[in-house]
Image (cartoon, helix red, strand yellow):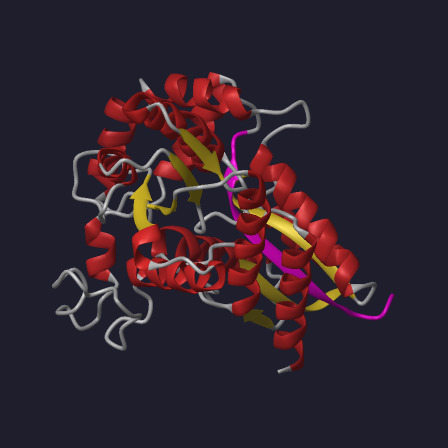
Amino acid sequence: MANPRTGALLLNLGTPDSPSVTDVRRYLREFLNDPRVIDIPALGRWLLLNLIILPFRPKKSAAAYAKIWTPEGSPLLIHSRALADAVGRELGPDWVVELGMRYGNPTIASALERLRAANVSQLVVLPLFPQYSEAATGSALAKLTEEMQRSDYAPPLETISAFYDAPGFTRSVANAAEESLREFSADFVLFSYHGLPERHVLASDPSGAHCLASDDCCASVPEANPNCYRAQCFATTRAVAEILGLGPEQHATAFQSRLGRTPWIQPFTDHILVDLAERGIRRIAVICPSFTADCLETLEEIGIRAAEQWHGLCGGELELIPAVNARPDWAHEVAEAFRVVQNS
């Protein structure tokens, strides 16, 4: 048998197999049936999913996916695989790099089987979610644990934690922005992050007294709740804005992708666009640093719908800054993160 090697497992959220209504419905069923995503009692989640969401949303979502689908497939999967390949080249033959999706394909279970077949004797895991949330990072790691228990394949494992302000990540985000902004002269830069229900943030606060208790509760990542998703998003903005040399009047932070009527963390991206248009801003660049790979939420929600909203508001232009995707600088930083954990 070949000498044991170290495994590097990249985890991302996932994507439908195609933009067909059938495949999108299957994907949404798996995604939204996760109790960490819709954190209500099982019966209520079943009723919500099967009586309200699945009869109507798959057709709408499938149409959105069709707008961004490429001949090679899902952008999120294409970029995630490209990153895995690039990281593998950076790490060299002593490592085995695999990709697993929390929902859809390639599954986490299939990634573990490939790692076992490659004689991986220790494993380092990187959830590709810069800011920590139970709905994304927590769910992906829980699924990994479940699959390892099911398969009885449990090599020693280390996990790379949230990297919301890691210099390698924020520099790569800023590099992507700088490249775009050389061609697109923006009046304003908006940082748009995936939203979360307020109750998710409140549930992550062990003190029960800090999160969302004041207007400036996210001015820094608090000792009371170092895993606060909203505070980590603002920290990412501060770090990238500093690299880009953006003053307070030149940028803002907002949250997109809200679903349903429950309160979600604010400010909302679509509302901020209205405010910016009223201020006379006409050329806006949007960075989406909660997504390491371009996907439906960046390409369709911001690149198409938000751009249409912006043009309708003021006749101006909106430029979507690409995610870090498989940029060489980002792939290098990911590989370095794996090496640091291995050598620690």
- Whether residue 165 appears in this view of the structure is yes
Residue 156 picture location, percent across and down:
61, 73
In terms of secondary structure, what is the magenta stretch mainly?
strand
Per the image, is 15 magenta? yes
Q: How many marks?
A: 0
Where on the picture, by quarter, is residue 201? bottom left
Name above or below for residue 196 compared with residue 165.
above
Residues in magenta, as a range = 1-16
- The residue at the point 49 percent across, 41 percent down is 185
**In this image, 254 relative to 74: left or right?**
left
Where on the picture, by quarter, is residue 133? bottom left
Which residue is at the far right?
1
Name above or below for residue 300 compared with residue 78.
above
- Whether residue 118 appears in this view of the structure is no
**In this image, 95 relative to 108: left or right?**
right
Residue 180 picture location, percent across and down:
56, 43
Per the image, is 264 magenta? no
Instruction: Please state, as top left, top right, bottom left or bottom right, where the N terminus lies in the image.
Output: bottom right
Which residue is at the far bottom?
344
Nearer to me, 144 or 162: 162
Nearer to me, 73 or 96: 73
Instruction: Please state, as top left, top right, bottom left or bottom right, where the C terminus lies in the image.
Output: bottom right
Residue 12 picture location, percent across and down:
53, 48
Residue 108 picture location, percent across and down:
57, 49
Nearer to me, 84 or 213: 213
